[in-house]
């Protein structure tokens, strides 16, 4: 297995774990840990896609990671 395959496999595995935990109600989407797992998984998948220069997936996973990070940091703000 190549480096980009290992990174990508870990990334998408984290995304799938977060999704499975959400589906089973063990870790609802939007919780800090869920957002952190999504951000890390999408970030790793983005890096892997960048390594093989697959730009549509770089954009998809980059945006997914960015939204997860933004959601994580918005958790501290009160809702107005």
Image: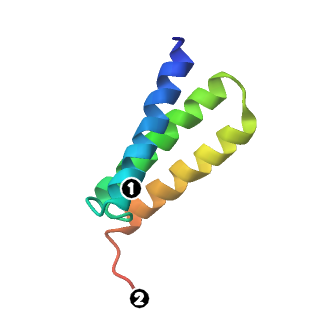
Is 16 in front, or is 38? 16
Q: Residues within 10 Å of mark 2 (few under 14, many from 20)?
A: few
Q: Residue furthest left?
A: 26
For the point 38% across and 65% down, the residue is 30
The C terminus sits in image quarter: bottom left
Name which of mark 1 and mark 2 comes first in the sequence.
1
Distance from disc 1 to disc 2, alpha carbons, whole Å, reads 21 Å
| Residue annotated with mark 1 | 35
x and y, in percent, of residue 18 in the image: 38, 50
The image quarter containing residue 22 is bottom left
Residue in the picture at 66% in, 38% down: 58
Image quadrant in which you'd find residue 46:
top right
Q: Which residue is mark 2?
A: 80
Q: Identify the colour scheme used.
A: rainbow
Q: Secondary structure at mark 1?
A: helix
The image position of residue 34, as x and y in percent, is: 35, 55
How many other residues sit within 10 Å of disc 1, few (<14), some (14-19) or many (≥20)?
A: many
């Amino acid at each position: 297995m190549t480096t980009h395959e290992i990174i990508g496999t870990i990334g998408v595995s984290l995304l799938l774990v977060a999704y499975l935990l959400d589906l089973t109600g063990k870790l609802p989407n939007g919780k800090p840990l869920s957002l952190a797992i999504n951000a890390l998984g999408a970030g790793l998948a983005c890096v892997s896609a960048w390594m093989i220069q697959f730009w549509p997936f770089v954009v998809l996973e980059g945006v997914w990671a960015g939204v997860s990070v933004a959601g994580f940091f918005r958790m501290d703000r009160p809702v107005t």
